[in-house]
Amino acid sequence: MNWMTITWPMVAAACLTLGLIELSIGLSHHPRAPRLLFALSAFTVACVSGLELALMRTDVFAEWWLFTRFLDTAVGIMLVTLMAFIWVYLRTGRKWLALAVPCLYVMGLAFDFLPWAPPGSGMTYQSFSGFRLVETFGGASFYVAEGIPNPWNVFPYLAVLAQIAFVADASAKLRRSTGERRATVVGGAIVFFFLCGGLQAALVDTGVLDTPYMISWAYLPVLVAMSIELNADVLAGARLAGVLQERERHMDLACSAADLGMWTWDIGRDSIWASRRARELFGYSASESIDRARFFRSVHPEDREVTDRAIEEMLARDMGYEAEYRVLLPDGRTRWMAARGQIERDGSGKPKLLRGVVLDISARRGTELELQQLRSQLAHASRVSMMGQFASALSHELSQPLGAILRNAEAAELFLEHDPPDIEEVRVILADIRHDDQRAGSVIDRLRALLKRRNFAPRALSVSDELANVAALARSDSSSRKVRLEIDAAPDLPAVMCDPVHLQQVLLNLIINAMDAAESVQAARRRVTVRARSRGASEIEVAVSDSGPGIPPESLGRLFEPFFSTKADGMGIGLSISRTLIEAQGGRIWAENNAGEGATFRFTLPLAESAKPS
C-alpha cells in the first residue's frame, strides 16, 4: 500500500459522500432535477477515480483495454450530466453549445467501439505499443500505456472546450442579470475542473506527462464549491425554518385568539391535516387520520349535498371555498361551522392543495335563529294589527255572502213548502248558496293565511297572483274609503323567490298607508295604483303609488326607521318590518315623492332562478 492506493479511493469516497447527500436532498425537496443530476455526476466521477486507479495498477492488455473504454464512457456521462446540471441549476445557457457537447464526445467515443478496429485502437491510440513502469516519490510506481496517438482524438477535447464555453457563458449571463453568487462559485469551479482535467488528460495522452490520469482530482474544486453552496442552503434553510417557526407561533396565537382551526387538504393523496383546535371542533382524536370520506361522515346528513357541491365548484373553477354546515360530534351534539379556504394548483393547473380555516359559529347561528323568531313574532303581531284596521271592511265583506246565504235558505224553505215542492228553484237557490259560501270561505282562507304564525318559507311564486289575492282583501276597505284601487301587472312576469305571506303583508301595509294618504284629498282624486314590472334581467320591481300630499322631505330618510311615523297615531313599525321582510328575500325597498302629487313606495324581488335569500 502506498499513497496512490490511498488518495484515489479517498477522492472516490468524497465524491460518493457528496453524491449521496445531494441524492437525499433531491429526492425529498423541490426542485429535484439539479440535485439529482449533480448526484449522478458525483457518482460518475467516483467511478472515474476507481478506473484511474485500476489503469495505473494493471499491465495486462485485456484489462487495460476494458478499463480504458469504461473510463472513456464514464467521462462522457460526466460531461453530459454536468452540462445538464448547469442548464437546470443556473437556468440559462446557449442550446447549441449544450447540444454540441454530447455530439462531439460521441464522435470520439465511437472509435473505442468500432467492430473492425484492432484491439487497443480507440479514441486515445491508433495502435497500442505496450506498458511502461514509472517510479514516483514515496516508493510508489504505476503503469503508463504507450502507443501511436489517434489523430481523431481532437473530438473529445473539442467537447471539453464546448463545455467550458457553455458553462462560462451561462455563469456570466446569470451573474450579469441577477448577481447571484452561485454563478461565480459553481460555474467557476466547473470551468476550472474542465480546464485542469482536460489539459492533464491531453498531456498524458500525448506522452508529455508521465502521470496517471487525474481527472477525478480536478473534480475536487467542484466538490468544494458545491459544499459551500450546500452549506449556504443549509444555513438559509435554518434561518427560514426559524422565521417560519416564529410565524407559526404568531399564527397559532392569532388563531387561538380568534378560536380558528386550520386545515390543509392534500387533494392528490386525499389526506387532511388539521390543527389541534380544528380536531377539537370536529371531535377528532389527535392521532386519527382524516380524509374526505371521514370529513363527510362528520357533516350533518342534511348539509352534505350543499357542502359537497361547494367543494366541487371550487375544484372546477378558480374560486375560493366558503361553506357553512353542521357537524355531528361523537357525543351526539350538533355544532355549526363556517369554513373558508383557498385552492393551490400545480404547474399544469390541476388542484393540488386546499388550505383554510374553520370557525365555530354555533353561538351566531343561535342568535340568528332567535332574531328570526323575534322577527316572525313581530311580523305576525303587525299582521294582526293590520287586520284590526280591516275589521269593519272585512265584516262587510263577510256579511254580504252570509246574509245572502240566510235569505236563500229562507226562500228554499218556502219553495219546499209548495205542493208539490219546486225542486228546480231549490236547485238554483242551492247553487247560489254554494257560491256565497265559497266567497266567504275565500275571505276566511286569506285571513287565516295572513294571521297564522309560521316560519320563513320562500318559494317560487307569481307576483300577479299575489297582487290579485291582496286586492281581494283590500277591495272592501278601499270602497268604504272611496279610494280607487288599481292593479297593473305586466303580462308574463317571471316567478320570484319569496315567502307569499310576507309578500302579502308588505303589499297590504303599503296599500293601507297609501289609502291613508289618499284620504286626505277630495274623494274624486283618491287613487292608489300598484304596478309590477321587470327590472333588469334578475329582479322584479313593485311600486305602490298614491294621490296624497306626498312625504315631507325631512322625513324621507327616516321612513324605515323603527318607531318613526308621520301619522299622529302611528306606531312606526309597519315600514320597518316591511324593510326587514323584503331584505330577507334578497330585495330592496325605498320611497320617493312623485313629480305631480303623492308618493311612491318601491321594492324589488329577485327572480326565482337567481335569488339568494338571506
Image: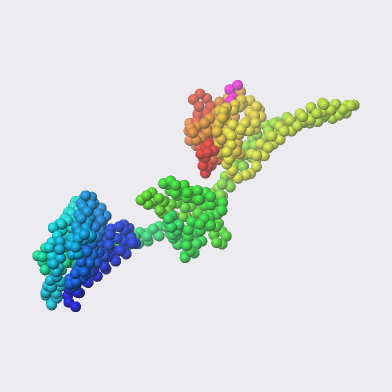
Of all residues, the one furthest to the top in this rendering is 524
- Residue 6 percent coordinates (x, y): 20, 74
Residue 527 belongs to the span the image colors magenta: yes
Q: Is residue 76 left or right of residue 575?
A: left
The image quarter in which residue 77 lies: bottom left
- Residue 47 percent coordinates (x, y): 24, 67
| Residue at 18% in and 52% down | 169
| Residue at 37% in and 61% down | 249
In-front residue for pair 570/577:
577
| Residue at 65% in and 32% down | 473
Quadrant where the image shows the N terminus:
bottom left
In-front residue for pair 586/452:
586
Is residue 329 in view from this perspective? yes
Of all residues, the one furthest to the left in this rendering is 208
The image quarter in which residue 526 lies: top right
Q: Is residue 303 left or right of residue 129?
A: right
Range drawn in magenta: 524-528
The image quarter in which residue 206 lies: bottom left
Can you say whether 547 is above or below 136 in the image? Answer: above
- Residue 213 percent coordinates (x, y): 16, 66
Task: Tell me how the rendering is colored.
Answer: rainbow
Q: Is residue 250 left or right of residue 193?
A: right
Can you say whether 227 is above or below 489 in the image? Answer: below
| Residue at 11% in and 74% down | 135
Residue 451 belongs to the span the image colors magenta: no
Is residue 573 in view from this perspective? no
